[in-house]
Image: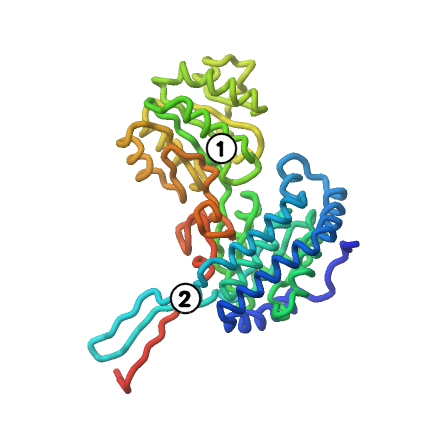
């Protein structure tokens, strides 16, 4: 049975081990890394019963409800998906050593820019055990060591998964280090570990992400909360809009690319809002709206949306509706309230679609498709580290290429300046 006791090694000791492992991982060939990942996938499947036992201990001890409890829960199917995700990463091209650019200067110097690992990745995440495996696979494929600080609710699951990964032959000592999640001290130590870790990646709710950004002394790749919008334009095909809205809201409401808000053009609002409100309600979605939306369906069927609603990421079966006068008002609303994650327009008008795609300032912008596609695997990138909503150092789903830096290699024949 998994134990909930903290590891005796200090955060600094674990970071030092990770630093040593990073140097070894950076030297592995693509073939060596791929064989390692395939062995890890096999080990995960072979140890599924032990993983499920540890996860049951976490689930029984936690007080999480709804979407958050679902994120913690592992099943046989999810473990198989976890293992397949590792195999998918193994099948991807290795970014390390890729030549990004090369040229020759007039003085004969040969310069080339190549991809190199970042080094040690510090990952702070909430109670999603799959992140433990996803991040390790991506880190190792890109030649990085990983230091993980998961949520305390997933303590047993994370420890069991880390134990399985470290026992795979060929994994360098320190390649994955799991910090104590019973105290917040480990978070503070990790985000201030300059010289020991190279980048911090927070994954979770807006509160966690904001805290890390505001307090870290290391560079942070921000994985964003998802207050995602769908704008149903005046020329939208209603059947298409229904399908997109229902999928984006209900297919998995606990994830960051689920739609939270819907904007409807005023010229179709009287027809479309009662129609989609009925379908959303039948799917168990709690509805909130502005005055115009509520007037069209009845105040008993739709609660009043407050100013706070427009900026909130619900992560549950709840959606707020608003009537807008035109595409420009929809864009202005989204750019004001969106978390710059994923936003969509449903329209037959190419002019409006192109304006929307150009002017909405989000990491992923859709025309006639569900926001649920903002995902590394769906984009053909394999497992992802998260969805970045910032503009430096990467934006959108980030995976292998985004877990690298670059360096210049300069070859001369005795040139001096």
Compared to residue 298, the image places residue 289 above or below, namely below
The answer to which of marks 2 and 1 sits earlier in the sequence is 2
Residues under numbered marks 2 and 1 in contact, where contact means CB atoms less than 8 Å apart: no
Question: Which residue is under mark 2?
Answer: 115
The percent position of residue 256, horizontal first and vertical second, equals 52, 40
The residue under the point 59% across, 48% down is: 81
Where is the C terminus found, in terms of image quarters?
Answer: bottom left
The residue under the point 55% across, 28% down is: 318
The residue under the point 49% across, 56% down is: 220
Specify the farthest residue to the left. Answer: 106
The percent position of residue 9, horizontal first and vertical second, equals 70, 66
Asked where in the image residue 35 lies, by quadrant, the reply is bottom right
Left or right: 185 as drawn, with respect to 280: right
| Residue closest to the eye, 103 or 45 | 45
Asked where in the image residue 72 lies, by quadrant, the reply is top right
The residue under the point 77% across, 54% down is: 2
Q: Is mark 1 on a helix, strand or loop?
A: helix
Q: How crowded is mark 2: few (under 14 residues within 10 Å), some or many (20 or more)?
A: many
Specify the farthest residue to the right. Answer: 1
- Residue 6 in sight from this viewpoint: yes
User: What whole-number distance in Å separates the C-alpha atoms at marks 2 and 1?
Assistant: 36 Å
Q: Residue 362 carries which label?
A: none
Q: Is mark 2 on a helix, strand or loop?
A: strand
Q: Residues within 10 Å of mark 1 (few under 14, many from 20)?
A: many
Question: Which residue is under mark 1?
Answer: 248
């Amino acid at each position: 049975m998994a134990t909930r006791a903290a590891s005796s090694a200090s955060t600094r000791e674990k970071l030092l081990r990770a630093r040593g492992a990073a140097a070894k991982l950076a030297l592995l060939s693509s073939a060596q890394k791929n064989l390692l990942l395939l062995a890890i996938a096999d080990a995960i499947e072979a140890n599924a019963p032990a993983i499920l036992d540890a996860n049951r201990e976490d689930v029984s001890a936690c007080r999480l409800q709804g979407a958050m409890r679902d994120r913690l829960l592992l099943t046989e199917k999810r473990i198989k998906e976890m293992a397949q995700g590792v195999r998918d990463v193994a099948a991807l091209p290795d970014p390390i050593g890729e030549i990004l650019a090369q040229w020759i200067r007039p003085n004969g110097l040969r310069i080339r820019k190549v991809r190199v690992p970042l080094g040690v990745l510090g990952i702070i995440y909430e109670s999603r055990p799959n992140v433990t495996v996803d991040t390790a696979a991506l880190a190792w494929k890109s030649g990085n060591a990983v230091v993980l600080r998961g949520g305390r609710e997933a303590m047993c699951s994370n420890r069991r998964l880390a134990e399985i990964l470290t026992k795979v032959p060929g994994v360098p000592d320190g390649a994955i280090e799991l910090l104590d999640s019973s105290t917040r001290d480990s978070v503070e130590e990790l985000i201030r570990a300059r010289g020991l870790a190279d980048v911090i990646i927070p994954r979770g709710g807006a509160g966690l992400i904001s805290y890390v950004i505001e307090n870290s002394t290391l560079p942070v790749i921000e994985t964003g909360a998802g207050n995602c919008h769908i704008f149903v334009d005046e020329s939208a095909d209603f059947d298409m809009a229904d399908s997109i809205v229902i999928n984006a809201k209900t297919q998995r409401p606990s994830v960051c690319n689920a739609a939270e808000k819907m904007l409807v053009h005023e010229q179709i609002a009287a027809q479309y809002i009662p129609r989609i409100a009925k379908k959303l309600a039948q799917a168990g979605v709690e509805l909130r709206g502005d005055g115009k939306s509520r007037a069209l369906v009845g105040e008993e069927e739709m609660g009043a949306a407050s100013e706070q609603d427009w900026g909130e990421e619900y992560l549950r079966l709840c959606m707020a509706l608003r009537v807008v006068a035109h595409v420009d008002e929809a864009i202005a609303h989204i750019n004001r309230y969106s978390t710059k994650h994923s936003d969509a327009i449903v329209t037959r008008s190419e002019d409006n679609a192109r304006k929307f795609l150009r002017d909405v300032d989000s990491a992923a912008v859709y025309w006639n498709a569900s926001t649920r596609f903002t995902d590394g695997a769906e984009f053909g990138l394999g497992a992802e580290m998260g969805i970045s909503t910032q503009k430096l150092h990467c934006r959108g789903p980030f995976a292998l290429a985004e877990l690298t830096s670059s360096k210049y290699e300069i070859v001369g024949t005795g040139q001096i300046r």
